[in-house]
Amino acid sequence: MPNHTPITPTTFRSHGKLLITGEYVVLDGAESFALPTKFGQTLNVLNTQTNKLTWKAFNHKNKEWFSAEFDLNQLKNFDEKSILKSTSIEIAKRLFNFLTGAIQLNPNFLKNTDGLDVSTYLEFPENWGLGSSSTLINNIATWAKVDAYKLLWNSFAGSGYDIACAQHDNPITYQLIDKSPLVNTVLFNPNFKEHLFFIHLNKKQNSREGIKAYRALANQLQKDEAIATISKITTKLINTNNLSSFESLLYEHEQIIATLIQQKTVKQLLFDDFKGSIKSLGAWGGDFVLATGEASYVKPYFLNKGYETILPYIEMIA
């Protein structure tokens, strides 16, 4: 009798990310604090005999939003003509760059492969900014057995903290020292976690534009002072068990970055009547903010302002 045992795909999974301290200055060596999220992305790989690589991407509602087909032999030869068809040539080219970048880092990747069906599953809405690209890059890097930071930096600028979050299950500190990532897992379990909320601003922020503005505006002396102070804030923030002290550190951090990039804080711009603390996370102007306070106050406040995505800490963080 024929064997009808289903073939189990090889699966890779990465966490999403939130940068709590060190936005912008993490690029220049500040010790920063980041949280891997419960939400992430998985990548499934099935071997076939088609001489093609078929790719299907599904969103958080399990709906296919992108597909492509590559000629495997041409892909191995770094030929862009390997893209046989796709629902978005722009995304297919980006995917081509990730895959060929992985082959450059590991020439054995895909070498003895006769065909592949690959599917990816995002666990959060793409506009949340939790790392749809970084989780994909880390999954491809793990699959290809290559350095995910190198694969990232061959395609994008950035600090790489998002890759560190993708690879870790617990809160981390992240620092670039001589352009090399230093990652440490830390214990962050304050007794006021139930007073921490993540609110989505319904605005996807282009972090590359934010980085460009930071590079253009901040002078070196400002940067050096900010890096030193924010590294200290990171340490204090992780270790405090007092909500009032935590809020004071968030306020101090916001003021430093506001001065550095010559922008008003998100609280000044949008929530000046909010009674707790509010901090931008990552590039300013979009994605999530961190807010502090009682659930009975925080949730109605933001709902009344039209912000419907309000996640308590324990729902968001791994």
Image (cartoon, grey):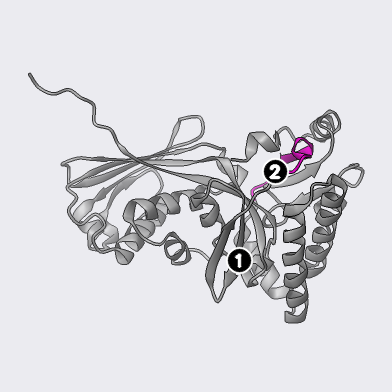
Task: Where is residue 28? Give x, y as percent.
Answer: 64, 72
Q: Is residue 42 one of those drawn in magenta? A: no
Q: In which quarter of the image is the N terminus?
A: top left
Please state which amino acid type lies under the numbered disc 2.
Asn
> Is 264 in front, or is 143?
143
Task: Where is residue 128? Give x, y as percent.
Answer: 61, 43
Name above or below for residue 104 compared with residue 190: below
Farthest residue to the top: give it.
1
Task: Where is residue 305? Give x, y as percent.
Answer: 82, 35
Question: Does dot 1 land on a helix, a strand or a loop?
Answer: strand
**What residue is at 66 percent from the left and 61 percent from the top?**
32
Task: Where is residue 214? Give x, y as percent.
Answer: 70, 69
**What residue is at 65 percent from the left and 66 percent from the top?**
26
Q: Is residue 195 one of those drawn in magenta? A: yes
Numbered badge on residue 204: none
Judge the density around disc 2: few (<14), some (14-19), many (≥20) Cα neighbours within 10 Å. Answer: few
Name above or below for residue 292 compared with residue 238: above
Q: Mark 1 points at which residue?
A: 175
| 72 displayed left or right of 123 | left
Farthest residue to the left: give it.
1
The reply to whether residue 92 is visible in this rendering is no
Name above or below for residue 80 compared with residue 289: below
Q: Name the residue under label 2.
A: 189
- Could you tell me how many numbered marks the image carries? 2
Q: Distance between the residues labelled 1 and 2?
A: 21 Å
Judge the density around disc 1: few (<14), some (14-19), many (≥20) Cα neighbours within 10 Å. Answer: many
Q: Give the range drawn in magenta.
A: 189-204
Q: In which quarter of the image is the C terminus?
A: top right
The reply to whether residue 44 is visible in this rendering is yes
Can you tell which quarter of the image residue 68 is in? top left
